[in-house]
Amino acid sequence: MNTFDPIWETKYAAGHAQRYPWDCVVSFVYRQAPRDRSRGNGNVLEVGCRTGLNLWFAAREGFAVAGLDASPSAIDAARRRFETEGLQGDLRVGLCHELPWEDESVDLAIDRWSLMRVGHAVQRQAVAEVYRVLRPGGVFFSNGYSERHSSAQAGVRQPDGRVTGIARGTLVGAGGLHFSTHGDIETLFADLGEILVLEHVEVENLALMDERRHTEWRIVARKT
């Protein structure tokens, strides 16, 4: 099953990239990194790693890093950056619900807006895969859009839960996206571990006349 939207391969093939890590990922890594050993003995996995901006940060901080993305162009860009800067990383082309890593081999896992690009069924498979590769006590950060986002009602909702053809708001041209409800989050993480953080973040840009609300979920969960 592959619901990866090819629009992202087109974007990355055309040179779409961001250089620096997201602040919420930086905070997660610093707060949740293992305290009983050196960073060189800890590892970070990102599903949907795009051009490797978050893993670039983690590798520079001394962690062993791994990541995958369904876009070959994004992974090529990530590999080139790592090679240019003398960094090591296990960077692969692949799907978020088919992780090619061993059981209980990962300390920290990151999903920043990758699960929002697939439907309900694939999300459940992907979260189960993340928990499979996490060590007991390992921690997962997941970040995606909520149903209160201005773009959530500006397209066509598909049977798998994604909204396509977004015509208004800040997410025009972003392909098919999943906007999660609180119930979606509870269902997705039910029985898979201990939720440490469940934040709903809402930012309203008052400089815009319409379609100005950005909303997202930030979840931190530990494998028990």
Image (spheres, rainbow, N blue to C red):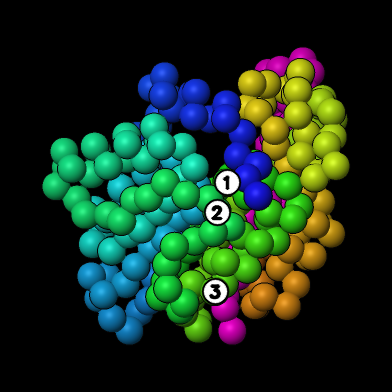
Q: Quadrant location of residue 188?
A: bottom right
Looking at the picture, which amino acid does disc 2 mark?
Cys
Name the mark on residue 114.
1
- Secondary structure, mark 1, is loop
Q: Nearer the viewer, residue 171 or 103?
A: 103
Looking at the picture, which amino acid does disc 3 mark?
Arg
Asked if disc 2 and disc 1 are in contact, CB closer than 8 Å, the reply is yes
- Mark positioned earlier in the residue sequence (2 or 3): 2
Q: Position of residue 99 (x, y in %)?
A: 49, 61
Q: 10 Å neighbourhood of mark 3: few (<14), some, or many (≥20)?
A: some
Residue 137 in the image: above or below residue 28: below
Looking at the picture, which amino acid does disc 1 mark?
Ser
Name the mark on residue 96.
2
Q: Which residue is mark 3?
A: 132
Residue shown at 46% from the left, 45% from the top: 69
Is residue 70 found left or right of 217 in the rendered image? left
For the magenta stretch, what is the residue range? 200-224
- Secondary structure, mark 3, is helix
Q: CA distance from mark 2 to mark 3?
A: 12 Å
